[in-house]
């Protein structure tokens, strides 16, 4: 941890971690496993198991997210090996904490996997934050739990850095997500076979502290439905609705009932499922907007709150390819590739609908929820795509052909998605466009976007530049229609407003895998300056920040096939 991260917080309203008050609603309101201990076993008739983290040899704080600390009301530590490092590595339990591992199941790669659960995650407790919201502190990599199966419950530095960075990067991109408070080195080695190819190696271990109002996921409900534990299914649903969906809150008398009533209760559960579907539709549209590929969209990795959860073998779409997946485990089937994410989200929601069916008992209501997902996703994605293109609204005659040709064009040569859309902002849509076109023709038009192409010679070859130039002419003509009054009920805007709409929809900086890998390698050398700089830049991803331009460049060629910079495994 560098010296800058050791400076105490300047806020006067924050308290040390040791003085935080915990209010553990999940543990208090739901039944736990009567058996304790972290030995692997099948658990029944419980929502969680009490389990304490396994202490590590030499905890040391590597990184701290000040905005998350402030959200929680917790001051930045002033020592990298003090109480905070001990607690956030799992070496100490503070008064009020009630650590547990949650029980859930899930469908993995399309198949029911049975009991899964928090195999390397342990929730320490819930903090009532200054904004009035309860948020869980959860350690990932803190040791074995009953749900670890044959694994050790640990996490390596590389996966922990990736989760820490991406949680925060996604938040500042405006994507619903869990957050990350801290990154702690354990001082111990963890053995991992990174690509499952028979070459295990010892790597430095680490623990990341994740933060969210709830880590409940689709699989929490699936396990109860699969085992016929319908009373627990209802109790968990009532708890989640009461604590996290206030607008749907059940009257107390009804929450105490075991069997849903034929009217209000079932209608409430149906509205709740509809809201889950709506939030999931918005979430997936955001992923598509910024070119994020989750990599492992199993139902146990889908948040009931519509958050991005469980950052594993994720990646950012650099060369635009609808079939690209960062997950080596998925390299053959490409089930979770970029273009499949909306379809898989709906498939997962169907699995959740099946689990909640005993509570809702109305197939039409469940079908309606799924329709809400599809409609929400489509409307949100089209609105976001319009913003990315700087258009007041999509729906004008010729728009569908313009979009189809764009996505085909992006895949004809290797084109960086982030840089292409960011560069499109700077295409003039006034008379200057014709001036450039007359002076240099298609070569000049294509040249305005040359920074987005991985092979400039191929991209600027006559055939491709002719197609790109033709598309740009159509695009500019289309943007000018927005200056002719009102389109689709929305008032047309000026060129400057178009630019601002595009700027706020198209980030300049995203967490490219090679940037995360550079931060990992620097931390392995005990250099925290790389991760600190990256965090600072990613907090303002839509701003120009010209002093950091090199962090916005397309992936360098040396990173194309380097481990950690392209494909990753589920152990990543």
Image (cartoon, grey):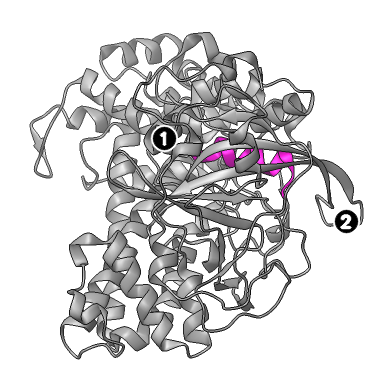
The circle drawn on residue 173 is 1
- Which of the 4 quarters of the picture holds residue 561? top right
Residue occupying image coordinates x 51% and y 78%:
46
Give the mark nearest the N terminus, 2 or 1.
1
Q: Quadrant of residue 559?
A: top right
For the record, the magenta segment spans 155-167
Picture residue at 34% right of the left edge, 25% below the top: 503
Residue 3 visible in the current orientation: yes
Indicate whether residue 262 is drawn in magenta.
no
Q: Is residue 486 left or right of residue 479?
A: left
Q: Say left or right for 87 vs 25.
A: right
Please determine whether, in this image, residue 229 is positioned above or below residue 378: below
The secondary element bearing badge 1 is classed as: helix
Residue 366 place in picture, x, y as percent:
30, 79
Q: Is residue 89 left or right of residue 372?
A: right
Which residue is the site of mark 2? Answer: 197
Q: Residues within 10 Å of mark 1 (few under 14, many from 20)?
A: many
- Placement of 399 over or under 388, stated as above or below: below
At numbered mark 2, what does the secondary structure look like: helix, strand or loop?
Answer: loop
Q: Nearer the viewer, residue 281 or 570?
A: 570
């Amino acid at each position: 941890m560098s010296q800058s991260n050791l400076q105490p917080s300047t806020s006067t309203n924050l308290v040390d971690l040791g003085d935080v008050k915990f209010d553990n609603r999940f543990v208090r309101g739901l039944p736990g496993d009567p058996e304790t201990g972290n030995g692997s076993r099948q658990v029944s008739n419980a929502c969680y198991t009490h389990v304490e983290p396994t202490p590590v040899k030499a905890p040391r704080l590597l990184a701290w997210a000040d905005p998350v600390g402030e959200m929680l009301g917790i001051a930045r530590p002033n020592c990298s090996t003090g109480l905070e490092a001990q607690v956030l590595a799992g070496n100490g339990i503070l008064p009020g904490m009630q650590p547990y591992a949650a029980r859930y199941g899930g469908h993995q790669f399309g198949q029911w996997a049975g009991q899964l659960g928090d195999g390397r995650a342990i929730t320490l407790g819930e903090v009532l934050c200054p904004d009035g919201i309860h948020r869980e502190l959860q350690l990932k990599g803190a040791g074995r739990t009953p749900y670890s199966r044959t694994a050790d419950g640990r996490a390596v530095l590389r996966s922990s850095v990736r989760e820490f960075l991406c949680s925060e990067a996604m938040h500042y991109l405006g994507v619903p997500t869990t957050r990350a408070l801290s990154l702690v080195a354990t001082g111990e080695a963890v053995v991992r076979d990174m690509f499952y190819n028979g070459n295990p190696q010892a790597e430095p271990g680490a623990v990341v502290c994740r933060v969210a109002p709830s880590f409940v996921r689709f699989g929490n409900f699936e396990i109860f439905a699969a085992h016929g534990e319908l009373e627990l299914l209802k109790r968990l649903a009532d708890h989640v609705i009461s604590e996290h969906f206030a607008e749907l809150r059940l009257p107390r008398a009804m929450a105490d009932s075991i069997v849903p009533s034929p009217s209000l209760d079932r209608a409430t559960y149906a509205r709740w499922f509809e809201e889950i579907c709506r939030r999931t539709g918005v979430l997936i549209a955001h992923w598509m907007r910024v070119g994020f590929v989750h990599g492992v969209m199993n139902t146990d990795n889908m948040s009931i709150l519509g958050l991005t959860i469980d950052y594993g073998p994720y990646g950012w779409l650099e060369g635009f390819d609808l079939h690209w997946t960062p997950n080596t485990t998925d390299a053959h089937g490409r089930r979770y590739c970029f273009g499949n994410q909306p379809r898989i989200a709906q498939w997962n929601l169907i699995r959740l609908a099946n689990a909640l069916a005993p509570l809702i008992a109305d197939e039409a209501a469940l079908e309606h929820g799924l329709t809400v997902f599809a409609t929400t996703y489509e409307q949100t994605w089209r609105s976001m795509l319009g913003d990315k293109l700087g258009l007041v609204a999509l729906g004008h005659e010729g728009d569908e052909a313009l979009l189809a040709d764009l996505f085909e064009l992006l895949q004809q040569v290797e084109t960086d998605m982030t840089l292409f859309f960011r560069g499109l902002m700077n295409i003039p849509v006034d008379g200057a466009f014709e001036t450039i076109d007359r002076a240099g023709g298609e070569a000049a038009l294509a040249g305005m976007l040359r920074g987005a192409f991985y092979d400039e010679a191929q991209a600027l070859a006559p055939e491709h530049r002719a197609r790109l130039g033709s598309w740009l002419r159509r695009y500019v003509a289309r943007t000018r229609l927005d200056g002719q009054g009102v389109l689709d009920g929305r008032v047309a805007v000026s060129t400057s407003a178009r630019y601002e709409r595009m700027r706020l929809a198209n980030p300049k900086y995203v967490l490219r895998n090679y940037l995360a890998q550079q931060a990992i390698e620097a931390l392995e050398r005990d250099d925290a300056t790389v991760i600190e700089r990256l965090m600072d830049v990613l907090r303002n991803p839509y701003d120009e920040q010209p002093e950091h331009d090199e962090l916005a460049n397309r992936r360098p060629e040396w990173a194309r096939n380097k481990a950690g910079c392209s494909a990753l495994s589920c152990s990543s």
